[in-house]
Amino acid sequence: MVRARGLGVLAAATLLPFAFACGSSSGGGTTASTCKPGSVSYVPSTTASTAALTYAAASNALQTAHQGAGTVLKIGFIGILSGQYTSYGVDEQRGAQLALDAVNAAGGITVGGTTYTLQLDSQDDAADPTKGAQGATKLVDDKVVAVIGGTFSGATIAESKIFSDNGITQISPSATNPKYTSQGFKTAFRVVGRDDQQGPADADFIVKTLGCLNVGVMDDKSQYGQGLADAVNTQVPVDKGTVVDREHVDTNQTDFSAQLTTMKGKNPDVIFYGGYSAQFGPIVQQARRLGIKATFVSGDGSQDADAIKLAGSDAEGLFASNAGPAPSLQPGYAAFAAAYKAKYNADIFQYAPQAFDATNIVINAIKTAGGDKAAILAAVTATNNYQGVAQGYTFTSTGDVKVSIFTIYKVESGAWKAVRAVNLNVS
Amino acid sequence: MENCLNHLTSGFTVDGLIQQLINGLSLGSIYALIALGYSMVYGVLELINFAHGDVFMIGTFAVLGVVQRFGLTDQTSFVIVVPALLVAMIAAMGLCAALGFTIEKVAYRPLRNAPRLAPLISAIGVSFVLQAWVATYVSANYFTLPNLIHGEIPILPDVSISYVQILMFVASFAMMFFLQLLVRRTRLGRGMRAVAQDRDAAALMGVNMDRVVSFTFVIGSALAGVAAILWTLNYSFNQTVGAVVGLKAFTAAVIGGIGSIPGAMLGGFLLGLAEALGAGYISSLTCGVFNSSYQNVFAFAFLILMLVFRPSGILRQRVSDRA
C-alpha cells in the first residue's frame, strides 16, 4: 500500500456537479490532451450535518473587567508573526485569542476551588526552524501549560522537540508535514490532515477526477513543499498516471524559466506544485508566457489570496487543495467569522477556525485538569469527538485527527471556490 | 542504464535548447546591467558596494508604485502602457540614482580613508537597513506586475522570443553603448578612468575625486533602475530580491573582470546562460542524480572555477599595480 499507513478512503464527495476539463485553462493547446474526465457522483459530506456549535462571543469590555482575577494561566502561541507569511500566523493568533477571550469574559475557569484566567503568550517563529526553537524555549521559560502552533511544518517540527522534552502539549492548527506527529512525541498534536493524505488526494483528483494522465511535479524543496510533491509523485503511478517530469525550485527563486522550459518539453497535462503561493503565482504567470497550457494544481500552501494576486489574469482555472472543510461546510464558521470580524475588523485569512478549535481543546482539558501541564496533556490526548468550529476532533495515538478533511478549490472569477471535498478516515 | 539513456534523449530537444538560450540571455542581460554598477564602483574606489543589489530592489518597488498609480492591467492599451512604463523607468532610475548618491555620501565617504574593511561592513549595514525598511513599511510580500507587454515573435513552432525579452537585450545593449560613450568621450568619464588608474595622481592633476565618485554611484544606480523595470516585467520580487539577484550580478562582475565595463556585460550573459542551461539539463545529464534545484550552484561553481583559473576575470584590463 503506497498510501499512508492505516488510511482508508471513507468518502469522496463533490460539492458541485462540475465538468472538469484538463489543459483548457488558456484556450486551445497545441498538443492533444490525454485527459478523460471521470464522472463523479455527489455524496453529501458527513460534516455538514454536525450540530451547530454554541459560540460565546466575547465583548471587549467584559474581557478587560475580568483580567487579573484569580490565577493567571499562560497558554503559549507560536507561529509566523513576521515576514512574508505573517497573515497566516496573525490569523491563527487571533483565533487562539478569541477562544481565550470567551473564557475570560465568562469569568475564567474554576477547577477545585481555583479560578484560572487565561493569557496568551505569543512568540514569533518567522517560519524559521532556528527562530522556532528560540521561541519554544522562551515559552518553556515562561511556564506555559500548553502551546498552540506553529504555523508551517519546518518550524513546527523544530519546536516539537523542545515541547516534548518539557512535557508541554502542542497543538498545531496548520502544520501538515507527516514528520511532525511521526517522531514519537506524546505532546505533538494537530487539528488538520497530513501531507501524506493530502498528496494522494491531490493525485487522485488529477488522475481520476480531471482524468489527466501526464503529470509534471514541481516543488520548492521546503520540508512542506517537497513532502507534498513526493506524496503526489508516489500516488500518480498507483492511479495509473505517469509523472513525466520532476523539477525543483528554491523558496527564494523568482525566475522559473529554466525549470518551466524543461517541463514544457515533456508535455504534461497537469503540473502539480508543492510549495507556497509566493512562488506558485509567479510560476503560473511565467509558464503561460512560455506557452505552457497545462492545468496547474497545488496544495494548501498556495490556496490563498496571494496566489490569485500574483498570478494576475492567469489565475483563472487554478486548482489547489487545502486541509479542513470548506467554510460553507464548517458548522460554526458563520458565528465565528462574525466574532472575528467584530474584534479585528478583518476577514478570516485561513486557519483561524482551526486555531480557535485547538485552543478550545486545550481549554476543555483545563476544565478537568486545572493548571497542571501533565494533566492537561492527558486530557488533550483523551479528546473524544470534540465538536469545533471547523469539524469534530478525535486524536489518534500519534496525535493526528481521526477524520481528515481536504477540500479542493478552483479559481473562478478571481476567487477560490470549493469544488470537491475529500474525507479520509484513519481506520 | 537504459532508463538513463531515455532520460537523456527525452530531455533534449533543439526547441528546448533554443528556448533555454533565450531564457538565459534575457536573465543575463539583467545581471549585466546590475553588474555594471558593481564593476564601476570597484573600478573607482576598490569598494564592493554590497548595497547595490538593494538599490535595485528599491527600483523594483518604484516601478510597482508607478504601475499601481496608473492602475495598469493586462487589458490596458499600448497607448497608455508605453508612457506609463517610461514614467516608471524614469522614476526607478531617478530614485535609484538619488539613493546611490545618498548612500555614498552617508555610508562610504566618511570612511574613505578608514581601513578597507570598514566601508564593506558599512555597505552590508545599508543593505540590511533597506531590506528591513521595505519589509516593515512597504510590504514583505512577493509582487508581480500584470502582463503589460503582450506578444512574442515565433522562431520555431514551439519556440518564441517575447517582446519583453527583446526589450531586455535592446535596453541592456543600449545602456552599455551609452556608458562606453560616457566613459570614453566625456570629461567626467576621463576623470573616472584617471581615478581608477591612480587615485592620488588623478587628484594631483586636478580631478575632483568627490565629484567623480558621486557621479559613478549615480550612473551605476540609474542602471540598476533600468534593470529593475526590466526585472519587474518578467519576474516576481520582494524585499530580498536585491540580495539574491545582486549576489549573482556581483558574481557576473567578477567573472567578467571586475572594474571592466564590457567584462561586466560578458559576465552577466555568461552567468545567465550557465544558470539556464545548467538548471535545464543537469537532471538529464546526470540521470536524475542532481536536479534542477541546483540552479544557484551553477552560478557560484562558475565563480569558484573562475577564481581558481583566472582570478582577474575574463576581460580585466591590467592596470599598473598601485604603489
Image (cartoon, coloured by chain):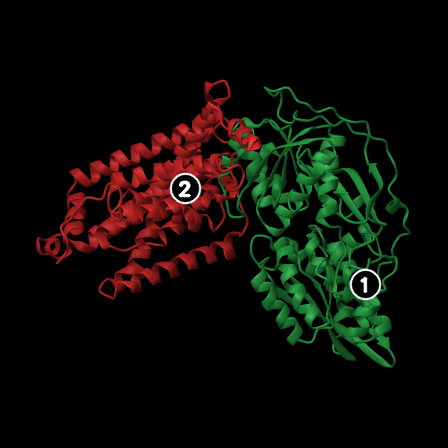
Q: Which residue is mark 2?
A: B228
Q: Residue at x 34, y 62 (%)?
A: B122
User: Which x, y percent locates residue A364?
Assistant: 84, 66
Quarter-of-image position of residue B168: top left
Please tell me whether residue B295 is drawn above or below residue A131 in the rendered image. Answer: above
Image side of residue B295 versus residue A205, left or right: left
Contact between marks 1 and 2 (CB within 8 A): the answer is no
Residue A303 lies, in percent from the top left, at: 67, 43
* Chain where mark 2 sits: B
Residue A410 visible in the shown view: no
- Front of the two marks 1 and 2: 1
Of B114 and A182, nearer the camera is: A182
Figure colour of chain B:
red
* Pointer 1 and pointer 2 on the same chain: no
Task: Name the quarter where the C terminus of chain B is drawn.
Answer: bottom left
Q: Amino acid at mark 1?
A: Ile
Query: In terms of secondary structure, where does tag 2 sit?
Result: helix
Q: Is residue A101 left or right of residue B323?
A: right
Q: Answer few, some or many: residues within 10 Å of disc 2's Cα (few below 14, many 20 plus, some between 14 and 19).
A: many
Q: CA distance from mark 1 to mark 2?
A: 49 Å
